[in-house]
Image: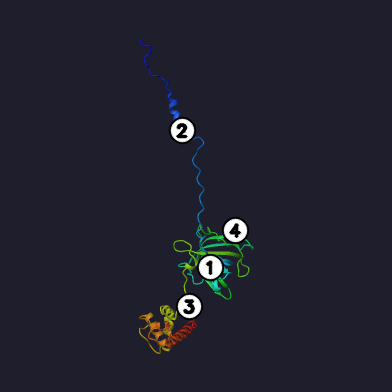
Amino acid sequence: MSLLRPHRPIRRPQPPPEAVAEGPREQVRESFAGAGPPAPAPAAPEPDPCADVPPLYRGGARLLDWKNTARSGMTVDFGIRDEGPMGVHPFKGLRTGKEGGQRFRVSVRLEPDVGVDPADLPAVYEGEGLLMRWSDDCMAGMTVRFLLDDGPDGTAGVHPFEGMATGRKEGEALALSAWALADDESTQHPRHVRRKTPFWELSEVKQSQILCRDARFVSFLAENEAVLAGGAVLPRPEEDPIKFAGSVVKAYLRVESRGIMNLETAEAAIARRRWEALMKEYFRNGYR
């Protein structure tokens, strides 16, 4: 007879149902106790789009005037205190006006004391500015006018220069920086900003092409046709004003083509002198 007892499976007591239901959750809580969600990494500062591009102008400015009207918007006039290379107005030749003026990223701060970086001072205005006009004359010196962005990224509806002293001598001394903006909002290097060539720097041929399309110049030629051309020319101004103007100019210059003025010949030199005399007479009569 075998002394071994028959094998029976060991029966262990089953845990109560509530223990089975709670067990896994308790283990999960114990496993992740104190872990918590990972802390978000600090947001990296947005790169400054102007950091690697020099401004078209950075220097002193004097607050000449400011306006805030429904018609003109928020504008500010500065006197430029640091002229450009060769004494040229730094904004000379740039597009102006509400429709096609050059856009800028403008930073204006109070003029710092000696040895202080203007960037360390709070900004009076940081935002976009549209170039409305620039001028350079012996009385007012070099001036520039900006139309400020009155939206949330600009003035937020409050003119930033309100309450500051204005005027050629007593106006607030400021530090002005202006970066030209391209159509894609990127900052442009000053060398890449498009500038208009002043009229008097154009060639005589180009000047004549521009003026012959100007209604005021056509009127001037029509009024003085007998003196300038020695008689009537064709076509008549009411038929084709541009061709009429070209015919009078060629008759006055005594050339068959205005393109001769681009040559280096005796005939071209005489034609250029006659064109210069015509321009003096035109502008002296107050047409432009």
Percent x, y of residue 103: 48, 65
Look at the numbered discs 4 and 3 and tell me whether their residues touch, using CB distance below 8 Å. Answer: no
Look at the numbered discs 4 and 2 and tell me whether their residues touch, using CB distance below 8 Å. Answer: no
* Residue at image location 56% in from the left, 64% down from the top: 176
* Residue at image location 46% in from the left, 33% down from the top: 28
Q: Which residue is mark 2?
A: 28
Front residue of this view, candidates 84 and 133: 84
Look at the numbered discs 1 and 4 and tell me whether their residues touch, using CB distance below 8 Å. Answer: no
Disc 1, SS: strand
Percent x, y of residue 91: 52, 70
Going by the numbered disc 2, the residue's amino acid type is Val
Q: Looking at the rendered structure, which numbered label has been put on residue 145?
A: 1
Q: Which one is earlier in the sequence, the residue at label 3 or at label 1?
A: 1
**Mark 3 vs mark 2: in front:** 2
Count neighbours of disc 3 (C-alpha within 10 A) and say few if under 14, some if 14 to 19, many if 20 or more. Answer: few
Disc 4, SS: helix
Q: CA distance from mark 3 to mark 2?
A: 82 Å
Q: CA distance from mark 1 to mark 4?
A: 25 Å
Q: Is residue 69 visible?
A: no
